[in-house]
Amino acid sequence: MPVSHKSPTQVQPITAMEACQNGAVLAVENLSFNYPDGHTALQGVSLQISPGEKVALVGPNGAGKSTLMLHLNGILAGDGDICVAGLALDKDQLPIVRAKVGMVFQNPDDQLFSPTVFEDVAFGPLHMGLPETEVRERVEQALEKVGMSQYAKRLSHHLSMGEKKRIAIATVLSMEPEILVLDEPSAGLDPRARRALINLLLEMDLTMLVSTHDMRMVAELFPRTVVMDGGRIVADGPTEGILVDEALLEAHGLEKP
């Protein structure tokens, strides 16, 4: 199958809201961003993801992957157009959009700061103003989904890296997001924890955008791959086609798994 520079759902330039109205759960149109020091991190990035898609985001360090991901829930704000689950990403709707984008950072310690696992996972729903009974239900469901139900009373900072990553995922699942966005989820994991994480993500019936250097995980888990380099999307298509294009991989600092 051919590798495209555009999303399979994108035929011609449209607004992000129009893309969402056409069925995309996430739409980014012509997004550009410069850091305060003048470094250009994103240059006209456009991306659409449909409900249920699991998409890998790959590229060398400095390609703009993390910068793009930080725009999806308003941590960074560049020039362009973003829509999530039918909502434009703007100041008025930012709290709602953030609940719909489950952002999981590379270092789980950036997300685990409460005394216990239960409190970490309950943090988001509590700040949504949900009643206590619903908060407890959401925490129980989220921990069950990541296979960590028995950890509710554990101290988060005493857990292994693999356990912390699962709990970090639970903290966003408790918000019932429309899309799960993960930054280097397999980084720092031993083989057993990495395999457990891959199996977890395989089983989850949720739209995903995952930035990673783990090309073996890409081959196993993601039907679609987006390649970024120099702040641009340079390829977007079926993973099978991306991974056999040795010239593409070499040109953008990627290794064939």
Image (cartoon, rainbow, N blue to C red):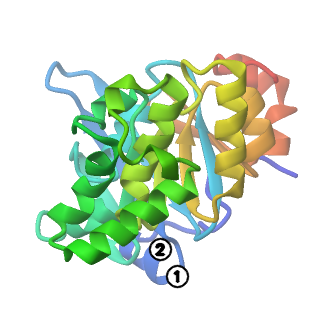
Task: Kindly identify the residue that appears in the image at 34 percent across and 43 percent down.
Answer: 117
Outermost residue on the bottom side: it is: 21
What amino acid type is highlighted by mark number 1? Answer: Asn
Q: Which residue is mark 1?
A: 22
The answer to whether residue 140 of the structure is visible from this angle is yes
How many discs appear?
Answer: 2
Give coordinates of residue 7: x percent, y percent: 62, 58
Residue visible at 43% across and 20% down in the picture: 62
**CB contact under 8 Å: marks 1 and 2:** yes
Give the residue drawn at x 49%, y 24%. 161
Using residue 140 as the reference point, say whether residue 35 is left or right of it. left
Does dot 1 land on a helix, a strand or a loop? loop
Q: Which mark is residue 57?
A: none
Estimate how packed mark 2 is, as few (under 14), some (14 to 19) or many (20 or more) residues with alpha carbons within 10 Å.
Answer: many
Q: Mark 2 highlights which residue?
A: 19
Determine whether 209 is above or below 26 in the image.
above
Residue 112, by quadrant, is top left
Q: Closest to the observer: 24 or 38?
A: 24
Image quadrant occupied by the C terminus: top right
Q: Residue 239's image quarter?
A: top right
Q: For the residue labelled by badge 2, is the local secondary structure a helix, a strand or a loop?
A: helix
Work out how far the residue at label 1 is from the one at label 2, CA to CA, in angstroms: 5 Å
Residue type pointed to by label 2: Ala
126 horizontally vs 116: left or right: left
User: Residue at image x 59%, y 21%?
Assistant: 189
The answer to which of 218 and 134 lies nearer the viewer is: 134
Q: Residues within 10 Å of mark 1 (few under 14, many from 20)?
A: few
Any part of residue 4 in sight: no
Image side of residue 243 versus residue 227, left or right: right
Above-or-below relation of 23 to 91? below
Q: Position of residue 190 (x, y in %)?
A: 65, 18
- Please provide percent x and percent y for residue 224: 71, 50
